[in-house]
Image: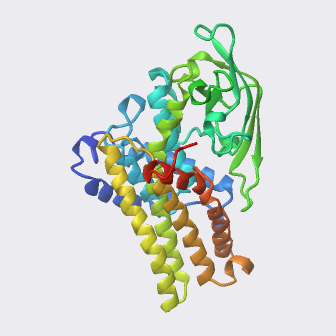
């Protein structure tokens, strides 16, 4: 029986996260069969997307996807940490791919904070309920990690202050799940070419708009998670502008706290589960104890730091350069975990054709990108050196 807003668990009655977590896991236990993936591993990307949307639908219907979200967008209110706990719980149970699921945490707050109230109320429930997917159009072929240099241009159809629509031309790349998405949070250049972060505007674009072409990219693990997206004279209503004209940099920066807090927390929960799975199949000897122990210490240190970051965010503090440390730690431990799998399961990742081996192999290959996605390790170490350790200027 679905939860109701006033019966089994009301956010206003939750006395603490521990109680919420206890009730959440009890519900997940009771609905394990309903939530279980309907495919045998290894899953294709199509399988993972279908499973994620199905799980979101069930959780939304039961109420769990509504906790931590404002009532004005279909939520039931409560602290954002409630939805962080949900993401961690379903990630550690292997019900969803945490990387795919975390897009909800990245993009829904953007609409809530920067779209018109009417638009946010219309579309955010669809994302939470699994009836829509959205993507994030930020990266470009010639921008690298320098987001402020993006060139995809939006031109007003008339005067910029009164235009009823804008026309977009350009290209994005490394756009996660663009081929599955109904909408895109898109950064465009609206100022002079040298205006950098001062001349960027964000739009919320329907992906079925004429002029949009999506070309999926194959990754080293054979998945097509990313895509190139081309915009050729794509007309977007002015009402789809997120935030003020030339205020897109603020939109982009608003995503950082969620990406580096709740999304990381979900990923950490998933890595703990994978480490346990490795321990279950590795030889029971001193070498396993040493290798797994090293990864566990790294993972635990990251988890402790991530929890502190979430508390800071919940207290209303602004997150900044210090979150680059967590990004480096996450990249390091993710690769260390899958390196450990390769060491403790010799030949399995390279030679075995079984389903379990294919799963380890796919995730091992994906982990090689951990030092690239979400800001490269080089960039993060530069930020740490210059802004936290005062070892030189940004130039």
- In the picture, residue 18 is in which quadrant? bottom left
| Res 79 seen here | yes
Query: Left or right of 28: which side holds 279?
Result: right
Please tell me whether residue 167 is drawn above or below residue 159 in the rendered image: below
Position in image of residue 140 (x %, y %)? 70, 39
Please tell me whether residue 126 is drawn above or below residue 24 in the rendered image: above
Q: Quadrant of the C terminus?
A: top right
Q: Nearer the viewer, residue 21 or 369?
A: 369
Query: Left or right of 309: which side holds 51?
Result: right
Q: Please identify the residue farthest to the bottom as the structure is shown.
A: 285
- Residue at 53% from the left image edge and 56% from the top image edge: 381
Position in image of residue 390 (x %, y %)? 45, 50
- Residue at 60% from the left image edge and 27% from the top image edge: 200
Position in image of residue 333 (x %, y %)? 52, 67
Q: Please identify the residue farthest to the front as the structure is shown.
A: 392
Please tell me whether residue 276 is drawn above or below residue 160 in the rendered image: below
Q: Nearer the viewer, residue 201 or 6?
A: 201
| Res 33 seen here | no
């Amino acid at each position: 029986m679905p939860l109701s807003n006033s019966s089994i668990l009301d956010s206003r009655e939750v006395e603490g996260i521990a109680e919420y977590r206890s009730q959440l896991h009890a519900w997940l236990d009771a609905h394990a069969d309903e939530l279980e993936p309907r495919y045998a591993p290894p899953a294709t990307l199509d399988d993972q997307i279908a499973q994620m949307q199905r799980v979101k639908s069930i959780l939304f219907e039961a109420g769990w996807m509504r906790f931590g979200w404002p009532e004005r967008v279909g939520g039931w209110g409560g602290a954002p940490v409630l939805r962080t706990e949900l993401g961690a719980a379903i990630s550690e149970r292997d019900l969803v791919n945490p990387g795919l699921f975390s897009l909800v945490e990245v993009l829904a707050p953007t609409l809530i904070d920067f779209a018109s109230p009417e638009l946010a109320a219309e579309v955010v429930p669809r994302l939470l309920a699994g009836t829509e997917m959205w993507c994030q159009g930020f990266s470009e072929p010639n921008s690298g990690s320098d987001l402020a240099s993006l060139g995809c241009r939006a031109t007003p159809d008339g005067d910029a202050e009164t235009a009823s629509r804008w026309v977009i031309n350009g290209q994005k790349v490394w756009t996660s799940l663009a081929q599955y998405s109904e909408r895109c949070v898109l950064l465009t250049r609206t100022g002079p070419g040298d205006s950098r972060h001062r001349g960027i505007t964000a739009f919320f674009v329907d992906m079925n708009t004429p002029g949009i072409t999506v070309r999926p990219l194959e990754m080293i693990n054979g998945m097509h998670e990313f895509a190139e997206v081309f915009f050729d004279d794509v007309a977007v209503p002015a009402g789809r502008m997120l935030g003020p004209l030339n205020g897109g940099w603020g939109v982009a920066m608003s995503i950082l706290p969620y990406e580096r807090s709740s999304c990381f927390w979900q990923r950490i929960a998933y890595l703990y589960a994978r480490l346990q799975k490795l321990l279950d199949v590795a030889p029971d000897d001193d070498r396993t104890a040493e290798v797994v122990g090293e990864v566990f210490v790294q993972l635990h240190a990251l988890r402790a730091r991530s929890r502190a970051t979430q508390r800071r965010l919940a207290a209303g503090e602004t997150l900044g350069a210090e979150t680059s440390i967590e990004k480096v730690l996450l990249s390091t431990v993710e690769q260390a975990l899958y390196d450990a799998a390769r060491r403790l399961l010799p030949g399995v990742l390279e030679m075995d054709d079984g389903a379990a081996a294919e799963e380890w192999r796919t995730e091992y290959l994906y982990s090689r990108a951990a030092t690239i996605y979400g800001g490269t390790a080089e960039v993060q170490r530069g930020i740490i050196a210059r802004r936290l350790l005062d070892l030189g200027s940004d130039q």
